[in-house]
Image: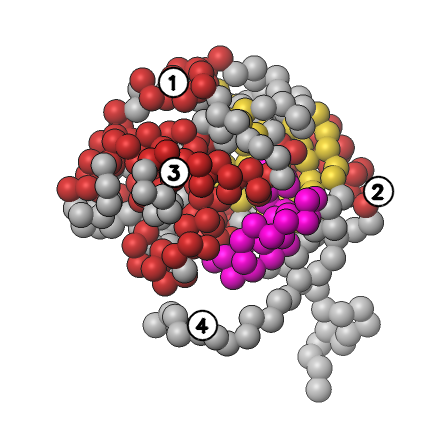
Amino acid sequence: MIPTDLVGVEQEVSTGALPERDRIGELVSEAHRRYIGDQSGTVADYIPILGAADPALFAVAVVDVTGGVHEAGDALHSFSIQSISKMFVYALAIQEHGHERVRDIVGVNNTGLPFNSVMALELNDGHPMNPMVNAGAIATTALMPGATPAAKWERIVAGLSAFAGRDLALDEEVYRSESETNQRNEGLGSLLSSYGRLEGDSDAIVDIYTRQCALNVSAHDLAVMGATLADGGVNPVTGERVVSAEVCRDTLAVVAASGLYERSGEWLFEIGIPAKSGVSGGIVAVSPGKGAAGAFSPLLDSAGNSIRSQLAIGYLSRSLGLNMFASAPPAGAVTEGRS
Ligand code: GLN
C-alpha cells in the first residue's frame, strides 16, 4: 500500500550542488561537441509541417538554480514545444486544484504505451492514467481554469510564459498543420467524453491542447522552464514565483515515471533524472535543487524521443552529477561497514 496520507508532514529536501559555473559551461560545450556528428534517427512527419525541420539543428542549454545560463549550438532556435507542454500545464493544474484532485482525475501512472495510444484509455475504463501522454494531457488541459476556451488558453500562455520568463508565442503554421491532421487526438477527446472523463466540449479542449503544443520555445527556454521546477517553483532568472514547491515535487515525480513515454523506465535506469520529450525534438531534464538542461535536435528514435537530446542530457547527467539515485560514501569512510 503506497502511503498517500503524508500531507502535512514537513517535506525535507536532499539535494547537492552543481560544479563551479566555468566547469558547467565546459561540460555543456562538450555535450554538444560529442554528439554533433550523430545523424541517426528520423524527423517526425505525422504532423506534416514537422517533416520540414532542419535535421542539422542541435542545441544544449543548462540553467542552474542561481540563474546561471550555459549554452552551446542553436540554443535560441525556436521550435514548437509539443509534448513538453504537458508537464508545465500539469503543474498549473495541480497549482489550481491540488495534489489529490488532479491525482484522482488524471492519474499518475505510466501506461507503458505510445503517447497517442487509444488502447491505454480502453484498457482503463477511460481513465487517462498518465498526464504525460495525449489522453491524460487532454484531460489535464480541461482542468485549466476559465469559463471559456479562450480564457483557458490565456491561462496556459500566461503560465508557460512565466515558466520561461518571457512571452511565448503560438507558431500558427504548426497549429494549422496539426489541426488539419488531428483526428486521432479528437478521437481521444471524444472517447474521454464518452466515459464521462472530460468536462466541456471535447473538440474545444483538444483545440486548446493542440495550441499549447504549438507554442514556440528554444532549448534556452526549456532550460529556464525546467530550472523553475528545480528551484521550488521560482524562476531563477526572473525571480518570479510561478508554482509552489509542492507542485514542483508532484510534477517531477510524474515526469520521472512517464516523461519519455514507454521508454521512461529505461531512461530512469540509465540516466536517473526526470525528463520530458516532445516530437519536434526537444527534451527538458530537471535535477531538483540544482538546475535543468534543455536540448533540441529533430532526429527522433522509434518512441518519438530526440536521439541527440537524449545523448547530450545523458552525458550531462553523468558529468554534472544530476542522477538522483547516485551516491557515494563520505570521503574517508570505512567501506567494510561502520560501527
Ligand atoms: N502535439 C503532439 C500530438 O498530440 C504532441 C505529441 C508529442 O510531442 N509526443 O500528437
Query: Magenta stretch?
Result: 221-250
Give residue 176's mark: 1
- Tell me, yes or no, if residue 308 can be seen here: no
User: Which of the pair 54/180 is nearer the observer?
Assistant: 180
Q: Earlier in the sequence, mark 2 or mark 1?
A: 2
The quadrant of the image that shows the C terminus is bottom right
Circle 2 sits in a helix, a strand or a loop, which is it? helix
Q: Position of residue 281 (x, y in %)?
A: 52, 28
Spot occupied by residue 221 in the image (x, y as percentages of width and height): 62, 35
Q: Report which quarter residue 23 is drawn in.
A: top right
Q: Nearer the viewer, residue 237 or 31?
A: 237
Residue at 56% x, 17% y is: 55
What amino acid type should be assigned to the residue bearing mark 2? Answer: Asp
Question: What kind of residue is marked 3?
Answer: Ala
According to the image, label 4 marks what residue? Answer: 7
Q: Tell me how far mark 3 sits from mark 2, CA to CA.
A: 43 Å
* Residue extending farthest bottom: 339
Q: Earlier in the sequence, mark 1 or mark 4?
A: 4
User: Which residue is located at x 20 percent, y 36 percent?
Assistant: 190
Q: Is residue 4 above or below residue 144?
A: below
* Residue ID for mark 2: 22
